Amino acid sequence: MNSLIHALRPFLTFASRGGAIALLLTVAACQTAPETDVDATTDATEDTTEAPAAGDGGPFRLGTLLPLTGDLAQYGQTMQDTATLFVDTVNTCGGVMGQDIELISEDDQTDPAAGSAGMTKLAEVDEVGAVIGAAGSAVSSAAVDIAVRNEVVQISPSSTSPTFTERAAAGDFEGFWARTAPPDTFQGNALAQLAQEQGFESISILSINNDYGNGLIEAFIPAFEELGGTVVNGDNPAKYAENATTFDTELQAAFADNPDAVLIVGYLETGSLILKSAYELGLTGGDTQILLTDGMKSDDLAGNVGQTPDGNFIATGVIGTAPSAGGPAIDDFNALYTERFDRDPNVFDPNTWDAAAVLTLAAEAAQSSDGAAIRDVLSDVSNAPGEPVSDVCEALELVRAGEDIDYQGASGTVDFNAEGDVVGSYDVWTITDDGSLEVLSVVNVEG
């Protein structure tokens, strides 16, 4: 495991000072997007005609199962835009097997039941060969068995629960599952290292009670304790239901005994309400630091939580971790994305691009839109050996010429292990005095 953070400047009690440095994304585009504009929350138009059977000479049908509504909608909408941008880009350079990719999209509503229904439609009605999604781990858990049963390859850009690693190792997924964001066993280690670096000796936990929250805290607790820290409520972490709207009892329990920090694991919508409630209860502004995770890393966090009567952002000074996007293709992706949408990519947009890329390259390599055929060559196009290549159109040209490739993505090198996991690299981030999200450093965790 690589060591953490060579330079974190001292900072931070919750709602304390912070430097106003905006996160800048460098751009150097070499891929070419089409000229047509796409609305930031555009859904792919659904084809209601009868789907051709997979692998019978029809087009490659690529599904998305993403949260266009619900608690993760602020991530899911931009992930959907990324998938649309990818398909448009590839279709301008020849598509797959000489035909345009057809993108078919379902809104999982950040709800496992809706995700299950969406995957059933994509697999059994639309007969897609592969699906990008879901975002939340609980939704992916509800959908993945449907994908496996129908031999559809499912790659999530952001479902990080360690449960998927365990089930993959047990053979439950038969190779039809992978993800382009690292599992929370890695993020648990990154959080523990960050906490140690900050000098925190005692931490209390407040977490959403679902696969994402439970998996992350189960990874964090032993990692922090191994480094000599104490999780004061480790035997009984404070948890809240996914549909909760009030959090006073859970907050009072988490802040009891004045720990050095409170780790809040949640999503942006409910997490913002939690931070606002903590302020209203008078629990912030003291010596207890707030730690957050990837589910709340957003430029919208400060605005969502709000300001104090004197105009200061309540969220100023929080610190957290989130999977970073630092692959060889990141500059080109950033340029393409900002040119199209006139905004910076969101946290899991590079991971979405890479999920679409490896699925598309595998379909071209297999010369089939059949899920089993795509599964069989997925690691052939994403892992070494092969010609390293980052531009997806160039990669497709090499595959069509019969060359072996090693796709190098925007989120990372996208080298899948036997369980469909990738190596973890994590941003350490904070909210500054002016409400901006600032990335301070990167932690590399190899498991």
Image (cartoon, rainbow, N blue to C red):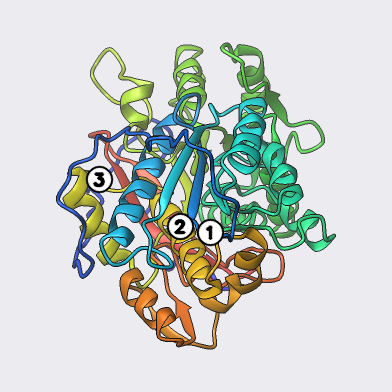
Tag of residue 233? none
**What is the tally of numbered marks visible in this picture?**
3
Residue 40 in view, yes or no: yes
Q: Tell me what residue is drawn at x 58 percent, y 55 percent.
A: 196
- As drawn, the label of residue 19 is 3
Nearer to us in this view, 67 or 52: 52
Query: Label 2 to label 1, Cα distance in Å?
Result: 10 Å
Residue placed under numbered mark 2 in the picture: 356
* Residue 56 or residue 108, whichever sits in front: 56
Q: Measured along the vertical axis of the image, is residue 353 above or below residue 241?
A: below
Q: Is there a contact, CB below 8 Å, between mark 1 and mark 3?
A: no
Q: Relative to 11, is 282 on the left or the right?
A: right
Question: Which residue is label 1 attached to?
Answer: 180
Q: Quadrant of the N terminus?
A: bottom right
In what element is the residue under mark 1?
loop
User: How far across and down, in percent of the image, does residue 36 sit?
Assistant: 17, 45
**Three-letter amino acid code at disc 2?**
Ala
Looking at numbered disc 1 in the image, what kind of residue is underneath it? Thr
Instruction: State the SS at label 2.
Output: helix
Residue 14 occupies quadrant:
top left
Sort mark 2 into few (<14), some (14-19) or many (20+) by Cα contacts within 10 Å. many
> In terms of depth relative to the viewer, which is nearer, 122 or 273?
122
**Residue 25 visible here:** no
Q: Residue at x 44, y 63 (%)?
A: 357
**Callout 2–callout 3 Cβ contact below 8 Å:** no
Looking at this view, is 286 or 382 the one in front? 382
Q: Position of residue 50 (x, y in %)?
A: 53, 39
Label 1: how many residues lie within 10 Å, few (<14), some (14-19) or many (20+)? Answer: many
Q: Quadrant of residue 332?
A: bottom left
In this view, the residue farthest toward the right is: 170
Mark toward the start of the polypeptide (2 vs 3): 3
